Image: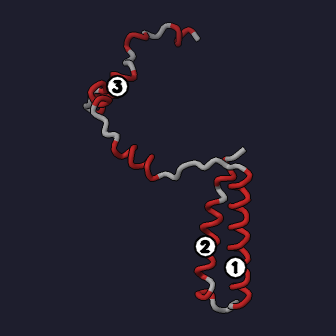
Amino acid sequence: MEVANTRNHSSKRKHDDTVSSSNGFNNNNNNNNVDLSLLEAIEKSQNTIEVVDNRTLKKLVLSFERRLKENIEARLKYPNQPDRFADSELELHEELHKLKVLAGAP
């Protein structure tokens, strides 16, 4: 404990000094020249959050059930020909992704 208290704290460099001297950039100028176009493009590409009410919930569930029924029928009709029900698989997958909204809804 005595050794830790007797250290000279003035010899330590501040975190800002080490960052600016180690990478050669000045932190103040770097913050002013930030290109926000990439961040804006990411925000635009993300899906908007839907409000989940009873009507929306019912619509999502009915659509999923319809796609599931079609997929099961296609699988039973062509059990040895997966290329015949591949489209049904994709549609069912899309409906499952739409149900992800429910994970974030209270």
Q: Amino acid at mark 2?
A: Glu
Earlier residue among tags 1 and 3: 3
Say if 22 sits above or below 49 in the image.
Answer: above
Q: Is residue 13 left or right of residue 99?
A: left
Residue 50, image x, y percentages: 60, 49
Mark 2 or 3: in front is 2
Q: Disc number at residue 2?
A: none
Colour treatment of the image: secondary structure
Q: Quarter-wise, where is residue 22 in the image?
A: top left
Camera-side residue of 50 and 24 = 50
Earlier residue among tags 2 and 1: 1
Residue 82, image x, y percentages: 62, 87
What residue sits 64% from the left and 66% below the top? 95
Camera-side residue of 75 and 26 = 75
Q: Amino acid at mark 1?
A: Glu
Q: Quadrant of the C terminus?
A: top right
Q: Quadrant of the N terminus?
A: top right
- State the SS at label 1: helix
Mark 2 highlights which residue?
Answer: 91
Mark 3 highlights which residue?
Answer: 18
Q: Quarter-wise, where is residue 76 in the image?
A: bottom right
Q: Is residue 37 left or right of residue 94?
A: left
Q: Disc number at residue 70?
A: 1
What residue sits 72% from the left and 66% below the top? 62
